[in-house]
Image (tube, grey):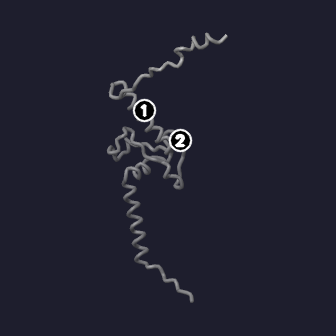
Amino acid sequence: MTQKKSKPDQEKLDRIVTDARRSQELREQSYRGQALKLYPWICGRCAREFTHKNLNELTVHHKDHNHDNNPANGSNWELLCLYCHDNEHSKYEQTRFDSNLQTGKATTLAATHNPFADLKTLLGNKK
């Protein structure tokens, strides 16, 4: 016995489409959506170009590293690919670490072992 397939509920389809459009509008209002409208879809470091297929690999980088600083003109944003974005944050963290060392906020122990201290004696025994 075969079952008849019922027609899709038109109200349900309309609701799905409306919800999808609303979600898209909310995303576009976010800083990422705004940045994607303002700037070409090209990484600001390596110049890799993006399309709709790989757009999820393009990120918005905050130049001052403050994610709450989102001016509408996009002056604190730049589009970077995932790799360049990671590299940028690594450089920033290294700079912060280095400056903490210089100001004495972080301390590291100096090496005390000298592996070559007795080398002359050791080499002198071989003839």
- The label shown at residue 94 is 1
Q: Which residue is mark 2?
A: 47
Quadrant position of the C terminus in the picture: top right
Q: Position of residue 38 (x, y in %)?
A: 42, 48
Of the numbered discs in the image, which one, if any, rests on residue 50?
none
- Where disc 2 sits, the SS reads loop
Mark 1: give few (<14), some (14-19) or many (20+) Cα within 10 Å.
few
| Place of residue 98 in the rendered image (x, y in percent of width and height, measured from the top left) | 40, 28
Q: Does 123 sit above or below residue 82?
A: above
Horizontal side of 101 relative to 124 (left or right) equals: left
Name the residue nearer the viewer: 108 or 84.
108
Residue at 54% across / 16% down in the picture? 116
The quarter in which the N terminus is drawn is bottom right
Q: Nearer the viewer, mark 2 or mark 1?
A: 1
Residue placed furthest toward the right:
127
Amino acid bearing label 2? Ala
The residue positioned 53% from the left and 41% from the top of the image is: 47
